[in-house]
Amino acid sequence: MNSFNDTRESDVGLATLGTETANDRTTDLDTMSVADLLTVMNQEDRTVPLAVAAALPAIENAVYAIVAARRRGGRLIYLGAGTSGRLGVLDAVECPPTFGTDPGEVLGLIAGGERAFLRAVEGAEDNPDFAVADLIAVGLTVDDVVVGIAASGRTPYVIGGLDHARSIGASTVSVSCNLGAAISQHADVAIEVDTGPEVLTGSTRLKAGTAQKLVCNMLSTASMIRTGKVFHNLMVDVQPTNAKLVDRARRIVSAATGVDEDTAAAAIDQAGGRAKTAVVMLITDTDFATASARLENADGDVRTAITLS
């Protein structure tokens, strides 16, 4: 049976989902003082990290899948609609400046295309074929991993994308904010974060959105750490593309090697702006070419590179 039809039929029970039901603590939201309103929002937001904590085993499995994809040359591809799609795009575009990835290594696809990031595209999330077309357009391969994000856990666009990814043998991960989510049946790894009723009924840009952001943070950061993008707790692959990042790169190299910031800056210049290479140069007392070769032989991992003879 067509997954889109399955999803549409199951929407009869949409109102019973935790993310869609009314929050008993906020039934008088419109008459609360601003102070009380903000207090209850803050109290509800505090429950989100605990809900994410309960999903850590599944998040761990998803990280392993992403790391495996990256090691075989595959990409991390986020897929979602509305707020969920925007959060995936946001995480994807932050990877190049933070981890020095190529823009094509982590992608964010949103129902309705890039214009949907700024303005809702009506009906885009209701057609699973749109996701198939979007994945085909980016050349999805068996080496990639697709992370489908849907707060409700039943968005047709996401289900269509996950089904297509699985049909060609790509790895799949689902991220939802309801237990027993429909999309969980369409992914190899199912992450379900039970965030419960929103302060504003059905507004999943609130707690559900926060939970999805936390999960995306974990997926990208942990997978980048495991594929050599971090040394100690330092983002050694940071791209110094503006004044703030130039200063940060200098401080990172200084902290990683113990040299003063002037020496760090000079090494970064010699390394052509590559903070990671500068770190290896300084720790191993080698030139740019030798440090670069060490990193290449170590698959970009600094700890391994500095131990190579």
Image (cartoon, helix red, strand yellow):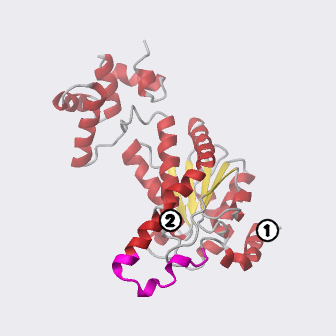
Task: Identify the residue at image location x=61%, y=38%.
Answer: 68
The residue most toward the right is 1
Q: Is residue 75 above or below residue 278?
A: below
> Would you say residue 105 is visible in this rendering?
no
The residue most toward the left is 262
| Labels 1 and 2: the sequence-earlier one | 1
Q: Callout 2, which amino acid?
A: Gly
Number of marks in the image?
Answer: 2
Q: CA distance from mark 1 to mark 2?
A: 28 Å
Q: Callout 1, which amino acid?
A: Asn
Q: Residue 71 at what x, y percent from top left? A: 57, 35
> Magenta segment: does it hold 176?
no
Q: Residue 285 at what x, y percent from top left? A: 29, 16
Q: Which residue, given by chain and number where applicable, does mark 2 sit on?
A: 209
Residue in front for this viewpoint, 285 or 56: 56
Q: Dividing the image into 4 quarters, which one contains the C terminus?
A: top left
Q: Which residue, given by chain and number where applicable, does mark 1 sit on?
A: 2
Magenta range: 20-37
Few, some or many C-alpha atoms within 10 Å of disc 2 (few <14, some 14-19, many ≥20)? many
Describe the element under mark 1 as helix, strand or loop. loop
Q: Is residue 95 above or below residue 28?
A: above
Q: Is residue 56 above or below residue 291?
A: below
> Magenta segment: does it hold 24?
yes
Task: Identify the residue at image location x=31%, y=20%.
Answer: 283
